[in-house]
């Protein structure tokens, strides 16, 4: 069977850079063409910053890998121009079910509130997302964007020389060097760039093994499109199991194996097949498309920025897979970093703005690590007493709702609300907490379309029930303005989420669609000050 | 008569659960059992109401139809 991840998508071709005597200078070099690196390249192109992506491979990822993409990731993909591709292909789901031993103990809805363009989650194989991102890059290239994707270009050295960074590359035609204003390492958990710089990870290593497999089931099998999680099921006693639906009739199976296992024995297809039959039923016929046995860590680098070199995604931080916080947080890293990098490169913001990437995304990584560590502690209790409490919660939860919030089979990825002490003054308790400064702008239905689609890639002022000029000059830049009104609020959710009891409101939204500041009325002086702070030029 | 509250009442359930496990970290079984006993007595005193305590004792005893 010709599989999605077998075809070269960006085959090697010789670059003129390889024949230059002096290393040519680029604005940004991205190392790694996974979802994070590709998204970063698109985002740079959308900000008119030329970018070169180097990857040692020339294909999409092998196996489904990251499969759960959260609402905020879909909104980011919308901003990048491939949200529809992902949602059209993906499997939508919002119901999660938790089983203990043989019984269903709890069922929950991930996004119980209405009024969002995008669903709580879709399942989509990482190789599809990568393909959509590459397609988007091709479309941008066709429109003249300076974005280059170089396959089979393995980075062997990265050095920060102060004024620029030097990157050494090995290709099928030999070595060459390029220099860049900035390098973004999106080269995954094993990050060669991190290793080359001698940088370490800090955090916890979990002593457990998980078998992860994609299977294609023959015939019509009616498993629901839900996230189903088993604690201590009869088919995997003492361990856990997870079942997810993917596009193309593919199912993701995740079985906890325990620590003391024989990896070679467990990876033999006949043994994997036996485990899956015990799970899904002996009469089910299926084809094994991909399998992997993995352990994981919850840890991060001490700093995500090292001079001119940035780390984003798994290269900077790793989490357990429970909660889908890996690829989703990687896309949020991109969302946070690229507008800052672009403004600095284009002289629209001071270099100090870049440090806020480090601060904000470390804060987010710690939140993700805390959540995924707690989930792991619940799923794989590390002591007898821990297991006793876990089982007591599961037993009580079937009948008594009080215990359900304590069940932790993964706290599913939500965007981080940032905190900037300098901007704290630009808030008012008269407006709803959900849209406080630092929070991502929450979607709401408008008469035609969605609020989220009104937000662009740049700083923006959003007014509700009050007038704004066509654009606003202040805080050192020009900011686009957009007027909304509760006359165009068919569900009342715009009022609930952005006004509360106030008659009007002004929101300053950052290029990553996070709210920077807000007021009940327009005040040019205040708005100018907030813009200056948000772009790193305040004091 | 006051009843036992059986709907969610802890605003930060993950925070609570982590703190509960933290108390038991690096404890042997005897030590953990003793911690639990003290914890039950402390919480029972805080509740005070005998009807509520009887309800809790009864639910804990029934195993909810399962063997623990």
Image: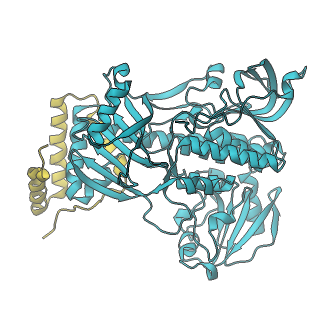
Q: In the image, B37: left or right of A84? A: left
Rendered shade, chain A: cyan
Q: Tell me how many marks there are.
A: 0
Towards the viewer: A297 or A431: A297
What colour-coding does the image apply? by chain
Q: Position of residue B12 (x, y in %)?
A: 37, 53
Q: Position of residue A416 (x, y in %)?
A: 54, 50
The residue drawn where x is 63% and y is 68% is A451
Q: In the image, B21: left or right of B62? A: right
Residue A537 appearing in the image: no
Towards the viewer: A266 or A298: A266
A177 relative to A6, above or below: above
The residue drawn where x is 37% and y is 47% is B15
A371 relative to B53, above or below: above
Q: In the image, A289: left or right of A56? A: left
Quadrant of res A149: top right
Residue A44 appearing in the image: yes
Quadrant of res A497: bottom right
Towards the viewer: A60 or A256: A60
Rendered shade, chain B: yellow
Instruction: Kindly give the residue lying farthest to the right in the view shown.
Output: A21
Q: Position of residue B59 (x, y in %)?
A: 12, 55
The residue drawn where x is 11% and y is 59% is B55
Q: Position of residue B53 (x, y in %)?
A: 12, 57
Instruction: Kindly give the residue lying farthest to the bottom in the view shown.
Output: A487
Q: In the image, A32: left or right of A327? A: right
Quadrant of res A269: top left
A489 relative to A35, above or below: below
Instruction: Kindly give the residue lying farthest to the top in the view shown.
Output: A174
């Amino acid at each position: 069977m010709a599989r999605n991840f077998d075809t070269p998508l960006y085959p090697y071709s010789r670059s003129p850079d390889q024949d230059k005597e002096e290393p040519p200078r680029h604005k940004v070099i991205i190392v790694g063409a996974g979802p994070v690196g590709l998204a970063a390249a698109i985002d740079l192109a959308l900000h008119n910053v030329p970018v070169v992506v180097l990857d040692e491979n020339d294909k999409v990822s092998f196996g489904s890998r990251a499969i759960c993409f959260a609402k905020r990731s879909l909104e980011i993909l919308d901003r990048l121009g491939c949200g529809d591709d992902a949602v059209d292909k993906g499997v939508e789901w919002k119901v999660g079910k938790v089983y203990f031993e043989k019984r269903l103990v709890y069922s929950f809805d991930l996004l119980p509130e209405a009024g969002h363009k995008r669903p709580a989650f879709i399942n989509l194989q990482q190789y599809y997302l990568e393909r959509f991102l590459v397609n988007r890059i091709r479309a941008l290239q066709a429109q003249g964007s300076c974005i280059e994707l170089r396959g089979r270009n393995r980075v062997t050295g990265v050095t920060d020389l102060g004024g620029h960074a030097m990157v050494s590359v090995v290709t099928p035609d030999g070595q060459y060097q390029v220099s860049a204003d900035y390098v973004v390492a999106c080269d995954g958990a094993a990050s060669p760039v991190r290793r080359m710089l001698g940088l370490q990870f800090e955090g916890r290593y979990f002593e457990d093994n998980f078998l992860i497999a994609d299977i294609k089931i023959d015939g019509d099998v009616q498993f629901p499109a839900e996230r189903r999680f088993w604690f201590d099921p009869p088919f995997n006693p003492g361990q856990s199991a997870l079942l997810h639906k993917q596009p193309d009739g593919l199912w993701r199976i995740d079985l906890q194996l325990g620590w003391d296992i024989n990896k070679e024995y467990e990876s033999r297809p006949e043994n994997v097949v036996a485990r899956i039959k015990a799970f899904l039923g002996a009469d089910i016929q299926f084809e094994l498309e991909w399998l992997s046995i993995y352990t994981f860590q919850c840890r991060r680098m001490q700093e995500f920025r090292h001079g001119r070199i940035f780390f984003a995604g798994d290269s900077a931080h790793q989490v357990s897979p429970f909660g889908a916080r890996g690829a989703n947080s990687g896309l949020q890293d991109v969302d946070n970093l690229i507008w800052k990098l672009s403004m600095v490169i284009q002289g629209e913001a001071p270099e100090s703005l870049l440090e806020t990437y480090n601060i904000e995304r470390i804060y987010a990584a710690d939140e993700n690590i805390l959540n995924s560590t707690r989930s792991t502690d619940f799923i794989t209790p590390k002591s007898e007493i821990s297991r006793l409490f876990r089982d007591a919660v599961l037993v009580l939860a079937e009948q008594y709702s009080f215990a359900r919030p304590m069940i932790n089979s993964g706290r599913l990825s939500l965007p981080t609300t940032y905190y900037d002490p300098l901007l704290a003054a630009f808030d008012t308790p008269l407006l709803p907490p959900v849209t406080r400064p630092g929070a991502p702008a929450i979607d709401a239905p408008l008469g035609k379309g969605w609020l989220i689609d009104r937000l662009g890639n740049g700083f923006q002022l959003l007014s509700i029930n009050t007038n704004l000029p066509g654009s606003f000059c202040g805080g050192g830049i020009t900011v686009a303005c957009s007027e909304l009104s509760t006359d165009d609020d068919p569900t009342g959710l715009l009022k609930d989420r952005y006004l509360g009891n106030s008659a009007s409101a002004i929101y300053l939204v950052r290029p990553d669609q996070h709210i920077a500041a807000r007021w009940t009325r327009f005040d040019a002086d205040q708005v100018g000050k907030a813009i200056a702070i948000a772009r790193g030029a305040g004091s | 008569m006051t009843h036992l509250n059986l709907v969610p009442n802890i605003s930060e359930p993950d925070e609570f659960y982590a703190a509960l496990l933290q108390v038991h970290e690096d404890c042997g079984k005897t030590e953990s059992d003793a911690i639990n006993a003290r914890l039950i007595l402390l919480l029972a005193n805080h509740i005070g109401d005998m009807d509520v305590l009887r309800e809790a004792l009864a639910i804990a005893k029934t195993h909810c139809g399962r063997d623990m």
